Amino acid sequence: MKEQLKNIQNVAEGAIKEAQSMQELEQIRIKYLGKKGELTAVLRGMKDLSNEERPVVGKIANEVRAAIEGALDAAKNEMKQKEKNLRLMNETIDVTMPGKAKALGHKHPLTMVLDEIKDIFMGMGFKIAEGPEVDTVYHNFDALNAPKNHPSRDLTDTFYITDDLLLRTQTSTVQIRTMKKSKPPIKIISPGRCFRSDELDATHSPMFHQIEGLVVDKNITMADLKGTLDLFAKQLFGIGTKTKFRPHHFPFTEPSAEVDVTCFKCNGEGCRVCKGSGWIEILGCGMVHPNVLKECGINPEEYSGFAFGMGLDRITMLKYGIDDIRLLFENDMRFINQF
Ligand code: DAH
C-alpha cells in the first residue's frame, strides 16, 4: 500500500509538471485528490489494515496528499505568473515607434486666391454678399438692362430650368438683389459659381467662378472705380503693377471698360503668359447704368455707382501658371498639394 501511495505521488507530480493549462491542473486534482480520485480510493482500503499499520500508512497518505496539493499550488502560481507576463508583453507599447501620419486636407488654389481677394476688398471696406445659383431671367438679364435679343440669352449659352428660371450666367445678379433690398451706401463683393453651356476644354468650363463688385453712393465717379481697381491689382499682383482701362461694352454699365494689368511674370516686357503683349486682361467694369439703378428703386439723379466682375478661375490660373481649367475641378490631390 505504501508502494501504491508513493507511486500515485510520482505519477501525479509528473503529470503536474507536464500540464499546460489551469484546466489540466484542475483535472489532475480531480483525478488524484477528488472524491472518486485515486488517492481517495487507496485510503478507502485502509480499513482492512492492522491497527499498527493504519497510522503509519495514514501518515504517508497525508504526506502524499500534501505533496500533491503543494505541487498543484506551485504549478498554478507559476502558470498565473506566466499568463500575466505574456499579457503584459502583448500590451507593451513601443513609445519610440513612429506615429501613423493622417493625410491632411489642403486648401484648393481657388480658395486661396479667393481668400486673398476677399481680404483685399474687405480691407477697403467692402462686405461680402451672396446670391442663389438658380435665379430668374429677370435678375440675370432683364434687370441688368440686357436687350431682349442679347445673344447671351440664347439656349446655346444659358442653362434654362424653365422659361423664367436659369442657372445664373454671371454674379451680376447679386447687384440687383443687393440694391433691391438695401439703401445706399452700398459696397459689396459677391463671389460665386456661374454656369454657361460651354463645351469643356482647357480654357472653358460650364461651371466657373466670378467675383462681382458693386459700390453705390452719392458722388461716385469713374475716378473711384479706377482708384479702387488699381489698388486691388497692386495688392494682388505686386506693388509695381500698372493698370490699363480699355473702353468696352456691357449692358449694365455706361461707360464700360475692360481692365488689363501689366504681366506679373515679365513685368510688361512680353512673355508666354501675356502672349508677348506685356498686358493681361483681368476684369470688366463700368459705371452702373441709370436704367439698372432705376429698376432697383435707386434715383440715378441722386446716386451713382460703379461695378466690376472678374473670373476667379482665370486669375487663379494666371497667378499659378495653371494651363488647363479642368485641373481646378478634378480635385486630384497630386495637383492640389502643389500649392
Ligand atoms: N458680368 C460680366 C460677365 O460675366 C462681368 C462684368 C462686367 C461684371 C462689368 C460687372 C461689370 O459688374 O461692371 O462677363
Image (cartoon, rainbow, N blue to C red):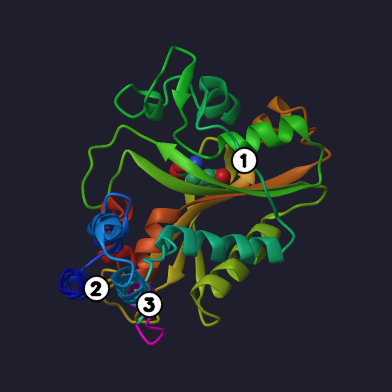
Determine contact: label 1, label 2, CB under 8 Å: no
Q: Is residue 277 visible?
A: no
* Amino acid type, residue under disc 2 in the picture: Arg
- Could you say where residue 249 lies in the image, as x and y percent from the top left? 48, 43
Q: Nearer the viewer, residue 242 or 68?
A: 68
Asked which quadrant contains residue 107, the reply is bottom left
**Relative vertical location of residue 30 with respect to residue 277 in this rendering, above or below:** above
Q: CA distance from mark 3 to mark 2?
A: 77 Å
**Callout 3: helix, strand or loop?**
helix
Q: CA distance from mark 3 to mark 1?
A: 70 Å
Q: CA distance from mark 1 to mark 2?
A: 36 Å
Residue for point 37% across, 77% down: 81
Chain-order first, disc 3 or disc 1? 3
- Could you say where residue 253 lies in the image, as x and y percent from the top left? 58, 41
**Relative vertical location of residue 87 with respect to residue 143 in this rendering, above or below:** below
Residue topped by disc 3: 81
Could you tell whether 176 is left or right of 324 in the image?
A: right
Residue topped by disc 2: 272
Q: Nearer the viewer, residue 192 or 141?
A: 192
Could you tell whether 205 is left or right of 264 in the image?
A: left
Asked which quadrant contains residue 16, the reply is bottom left
* Amino acid type, residue under disc 3 in the picture: Gln
Q: Residues within 10 Å of mark 2 (few under 14, many from 20)?
A: few
